Amino acid sequence: MIEANDLRKRYGSNAALDGLDLSVAAGSVHGLLGPNGAGKTTLVRILTTLAKADGGTATVAGFDVARRPDKVKQAIGLVGQHAAVDEVLSATQNLVMFGRLCHLPTAHARARAGELLDQFGLADTGNKAVQHFSGGMRRRLDLAAGMILAPRVLFLDEPTTGLDPRGRAEVWAAVRDLARQGTTVLMTTQYLDEADQLADRVSVVNHGRVVADGTPDELKARLGDDRLELRGDPDALAAAMAAFGPVTVDRDERKVTVSVRDRMAALNAAMRHEVEDVTLRRPTLDEVFLNLTEATEATEGATA
């Protein structure tokens, strides 16, 4: 549904995109992760026809973004980082306004507004002005506005920035519903747990390039070993675990952490000692992200 090949974009001496490649499957939620300035928003702007690439090609819903921007616009919805709704108007009035701006007849715009309010759990808001909405409700209304024309592809740029946990959960539920209905979602985010919860596939972007791509589980597997955390006598546990992988000791916390491939053998060895607490976990997406971006920084520094 989205294809980008060797995309390039410069702002002065800064290469915002430096040969970026991306492929997003139809009906999936695809997460774009990266630090500030990595090129995520520039990519979204190019794919949504708001900016032009200096080089490379990109298609959205089968249309070239440079040659057929009109067709691309008809196929997409965009929800930016900041709320685009009018706070004085009600939810219904906002959606009818967006429908009319998209050239829907008034009756059609009203009917579509009602459908979307039901879909996003806002049907009971009545005539209440948006300024009285919670952050999560406001963001759900933003999502609804982006779906006025039932787009095949929805772009979400940092959809839950600034929301509290309840608001984030509300937006996550709305995004999952859209994906179940067949909408392709490309989502930029700096929240690693958000990508882990929502994305079928993740691309990590740094310095204008995709430095890793895969499912969240595939990316975690790149770090390899499970993490075994043990509490007890740190010296005895460290000695017992040394044969299973790199060991980190925190004597203040009486904790030993070891990266292990054979989890059962390591657990059996640990149980021969007095252990106060045991935690076994996979690498997190946060650890993957830090590992990948730090590796890119090191490569860039060595090249410089």
Image (tube, helix red, strand yellow):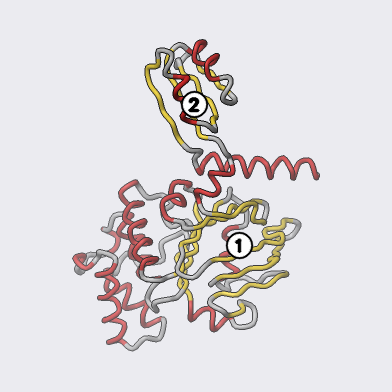
Q: Which of 246 and 51 is in front in this view?
A: 246
Mark 1 in CB contact with mark 2 (< 8 angstroms): no
Q: Is mark 1 on a helix, strand or loop?
A: helix
Position of residue 114 relative to residue 10, above or below, is below
Which of the numbered marks, if any, corresponds to residue 265?
A: 2
* Residue 57: image location, x then y, percent: 67, 72
Q: Nearer the viewer, residue 247 or 108?
A: 247
* Residue 300: image location, x then y, percent: 74, 45
* Residue 302: image location, x then y, percent: 79, 41
The local crowd at label 2, few if under 14, some if 14 to 19, many if 20 or more residues have their Cα within 10 Å, is: few
Q: What residue type is labelled 2?
A: Ala
Which of the numbered marks, if any, corresponds to residue 113?
A: none
Alpha carbon of mark 1 to alpha carbon of mark 2: how far? 48 Å
Q: Which residue does the image show at 61% across and 63% down from the upper left?
A: 22
Q: Which amino acid does label 1 sit on?
A: Thr
Residue under circle 1?
Answer: 42
The local crowd at label 1, few if under 14, some if 14 to 19, many if 20 or more residues have their Cα within 10 Å, is: many
Q: Which of 196 and 57 is in front in this view?
A: 196
Q: Is residue 181 left or right of residue 287?
A: left
Q: Is residue 89 left or right of residue 154?
A: left
